Amino acid sequence: MRLAILSLALVCLDLKAQQLAPGDPLVVVRNGRYGYIDRSGRVVIKPQFIWGSWFSKGSATVYICGREISIDSSGNLHPERFAPDGELVPRGKAGKIGFVDAYGDFKIAPIFDDALPFSDGFAAVKVDDQWGFVNANGDIVISPRFRHAFYFQQGIGMAESDQGGVFIDRRGNVVATGNAYANITEGRIPVTGSHKSGYLDLQGNIAIPFVYDEVQSFSNGLAAVASSDKFGYIDREGQLVIPFQFDDAGPFIKNLAPVKIGSQSGFINMLGKFVFRLPFDNSPGFIADDAAPFWTTNRLFGYVNTSGKVIWGPTKGSADHRPLFGWSKADEIRSCKGVPKVVRDRIEGYATPE
């Protein structure tokens, strides 16, 4: 499993919630219940919910008494906020998908057959069997003509045509072909071709030749690339700045990157030297500002800070996504176990959006 492509539950969470703001509480799981800690590892919202999301812009969502409810960093419950102020998120109604604001009101009518969240001002939507893009007003800006469409990043969209993966500009013009398995960052598009991988610039020109077995996104001016089963790091011009030596490698965030080399694992600095060692199976790096989630080989979960101090765990249980097939009656009953009547009454009083 590659460190930078986190295939655990974390990747199923809202993309925007994966980069926490400084000071946002961190989600943890203890004895099957979700709660939150601060950056020192102190529990600030006791584990009591059967599910909770990451914090994003000062609030998170928890499931309690059969409802998804918003919670602030002090642990106070509020009616569910579906999106941060000024943003829209997909929501279904009567078998169709539209986009709602923070209060659950449809700002883009539910007329689509499927949709993805907004990114870079556009959202991919499905009409019948074809995908295109809409803007924040709900106007179709790129007509549905793709087998699938994904996200825009730095003015470049990713889609799938009958001929394979394509990269398009904001007018829908194809600027290049290929597939991206990492984010478009720092003006470089990581692309996997038929045999090798490399990078394009935002105009679709080859910026770094297709000579690698694997390429990852740029962060802090460097990107991990693989050749002959070893990882090293290159700069935006394609110059190798940290030699090929690692068995696995992740992104530089806070000037630290998670790596594995032989039986050793830990975080290196931008000179390629270990700052601290930490036994883990994988880690996405410091996606939570000054705290990095990590998983051990026996699937225990923890957080480590930039000084190398483990502030949580490793323990059984880590944040997971909502049930793929929705909440069950048993979930509803379990989520209300132990909740005081005054809290149950307050939750019942919250309006239910359409």
Image: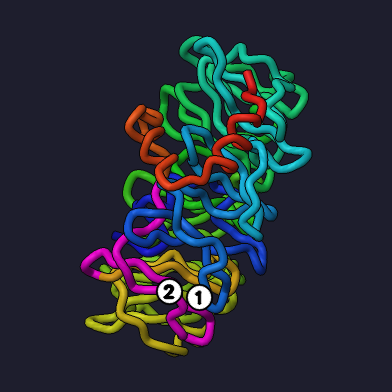
Name which residue lies at 74% across and 22% down.
107
Spot occupied by residue 309 in the image (x, y as percentages of width and height): 46, 85
Name which residue lies at 61% across and 11% down.
111
Residue 306 part of the magenta segment: yes
Name which residue lies at 63% across and 32% down.
89
Among the two numbered marks 2 and 1 on one chain, the one whose residue lies closer to the N terminus: 1
Q: Amino acid at mark 2?
A: Trp
Q: Quadrant of the C terminus?
A: top right
Secondary structure, mark 2, is: strand
How busy is the neighbourhood of tag 1: few (under 14 within 10 Å), some, or many (20 plus)?
A: some
Given contact means CB atoms under 8 Å apart, are the residues at marks 2 and 1 in contact?
yes
Colouring: rainbow
Q: Marks 2 and 1, how far apart in space? A: 6 Å
Spot occupied by residue 82 in the image (x, y as percentages of width and height): 64, 35
Nearest the eye: 183 or 209 = 183
Spot occupied by residue 340 in the image (x, y as percentages of width and height): 52, 45
Segment tinted magenta in the rendering:
297-320
Q: Quadrant of the N terminus?
A: bottom left
How busy is the neighbourhood of tag 2: few (under 14 within 10 Å), some, or many (20 plus)?
A: many
Residue at mark 1: 41
Q: Is residue 218 visible?
A: no
Nearest the eye: 154 or 176 = 154
Name which residue lies at 71% across and 23% down.
105
Numbered label attached to residue 312: 2
Residue 23 part of the magenta segment: no
Nearest the eye: 195 or 129 = 129
Spot occupied by residue 274 in the image (x, y as percentages of width and height): 42, 89
Residue 50 located left or right of residue 177: left
Q: Amino acid at mark 1?
A: Gly
